[in-house]
Image: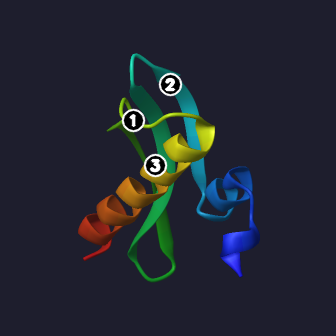
Amino acid sequence: MDECLSWQAKLAKSNINILGVTDGVAIIEFTYHPKPGVFKWCKTLINVEDAHGLEEVAVVILEDVLCIRKELEG
């Protein structure tokens, strides 16, 4: 079902905010859950220099955030 969503909607549903993109680096913030019922914000940088176009940047961000969330919540 999520395949039909725009890249903007996918980022919004994942609570990911893009604060800026410069020189191939995206500055983002996202939520994660260190324990049930608690959420925290994380701000970080993600390398997006190999991505071409906004949709590819969004895909890279979504994939990297998923990996980071697994580390933070694991």
Image mark for residue 48: 1
Asked which secondary structure carries label 2, the reply is strand
Q: Are marks 3 and 1 in contact (CB under 8 Å)?
A: yes
Identify the image quadrant of the C terminus.
bottom left
Amino acid at dot 3: Ile
x then y, percent, for residue 40: 46, 58
Query: Residue drawn 30% across and 71% down?
Result: 70
Vertical relation: 60 (above or below) 22: below
Image mark for residue 21: 2
x then y, percent, for residue 58: 55, 47
Vertical relation: 11 (above or below) 3: above
Per the image, the residue denoted by label 3 is 61
Q: Earlier in the sequence, mark 3 or mark 1?
A: 1
Amino acid at dot 1: Val
Vertical relation: 14 (above or below) 17: below
Q: Earlier in the sequence, mark 1 or mark 2?
A: 2
Amino acid at dot 2: Val
x then y, percent, for residue 69: 36, 65
Q: Nearer the viewer, residue 38 or 69?
A: 69
Q: Nearer the viewer, residue 19 or 35?
A: 19
Q: Are marks 1 and 2 in contact (CB under 8 Å)?
A: yes
Vertical relation: 17 (above or below) 19: below
